[in-house]
Image (spheres, rainbow, N blue to C red):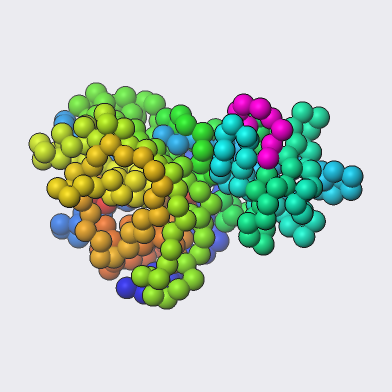
Amino acid sequence: MKLSDFKFNLPKTHIAKYPVSPRDKAKLMVLDRETQEIENKVFTDIVNYMEKGDVLVVNETRVFQARLYGKKEKTNAKIEVFLLRELNAEECIWDVIVDPARKVRIGNKIYFNDKLWCEVIDNTTSRGRTVRFNQPGNVYKAVEKIGLTPLPPYIKREPEQEDKENYQTVYARVDGAVAAPTAGLHFTQKLLQKIEKKGVTIVPILLHIGQGTFRAVEVEDLTKHKMDSEYYEISAKAAELINKAKHSRHKVFVVGTSTCRALETSVTADGFSKQNRGWTDKFIYPFYDFKITDRLITNFHQPESTLIMLASAFAGHDFLMKAYKKALKEHYRFLSYGDAMLIK
């Protein structure tokens, strides 16, 4: 498959700027791979497709307030600092992106308030820098009050106070993501309780989503594309629950492409997930043979993105593009704050 196979016209009017409320009342398009039928539902209907003994695997990464605005020492020039990832917790060293980059050199200090500042200690890319914060301990906590929600670049508005809650899953627990695992945004505590009451086990794993999720694929030959590495963890308990479901022929429902990539990274020789942690740059595109994922819950993605390629690998390319055509015609809402899809 080529990059151009995933090209389609996505009108700006179809890109959701805000989520629906309550979040579990988003539309749900259900794709049946066996019958090739497509149904229109509401997200709360998802429980009807689950059975006792199934597992629902979620990504409990938490989006932190990664966008900071500060002033450069001496000149007071306004600088945006976008936090990407923590490199060394003890020494408070981070990878960041700065704007305007031409004004930020090694040795410069950027002040965010009277308590928090950082010093540039290295250049990484044209806009990338490595910085050391003065804040001993938890930088995540320090930026929580002064930072802004890192909304995706295609949401053309400034972050608002409500985004701190809206752009976060209800089960988010571990700081580290600069983008939300958006398929999970549709779940409410009430819906999760309903799912558990049915006898479905909710299994948390972790993958910290980086800004690379928005990076464009620039090669027509997909085999030449390289994903950014992202940190993930699958506990022994999570692996045990997933393996139990697989062995007993129950279904593994996977919430989102990030969760899917972490699980498929951790496959063993016999096809089952194992306790694992580390960094993954796994790129899933047609025709990938899924080992763990039985059902995929995902959103409607950008044209030519790695996310639509993963969904296409799972659903089948022609079937998925047929569903996208239907979604556009029937005014489904696309991207992070948009509607959802269940591929079964």
Above/below status of 318 relative to 177:
below
Above/below status of 193 relative to 75:
above
> Residue 257 at what x, y percent from top left?
37, 50
The segment highlighted magenta reads 132-140
Give residue 318's quadrant in the image. Answer: bottom left
Instruction: Name which residue lies at 31% across and 39% down.
Output: 276
**205 in the magenta segment:** no
> Residue 39 at what x, y percent from top left?
27, 52
Instruction: Name which residue lies at 74% across and 42% down.
Output: 119
Above/below status of 34 relative to 195:
below
- The residue lying toward the viewer, choosing from 323 and 139, is 139
Instruction: Name which residue lies at 72% across and 54% down.
Output: 99
Number of labels in the image equals 0
Q: Is residue 310 left or right of residue 122?
A: left
Quadrant housing the N terminus: bottom left
Q: Is residue 27 left or right of residue 80?
A: left
Above/below status of 4 relative to 246:
below
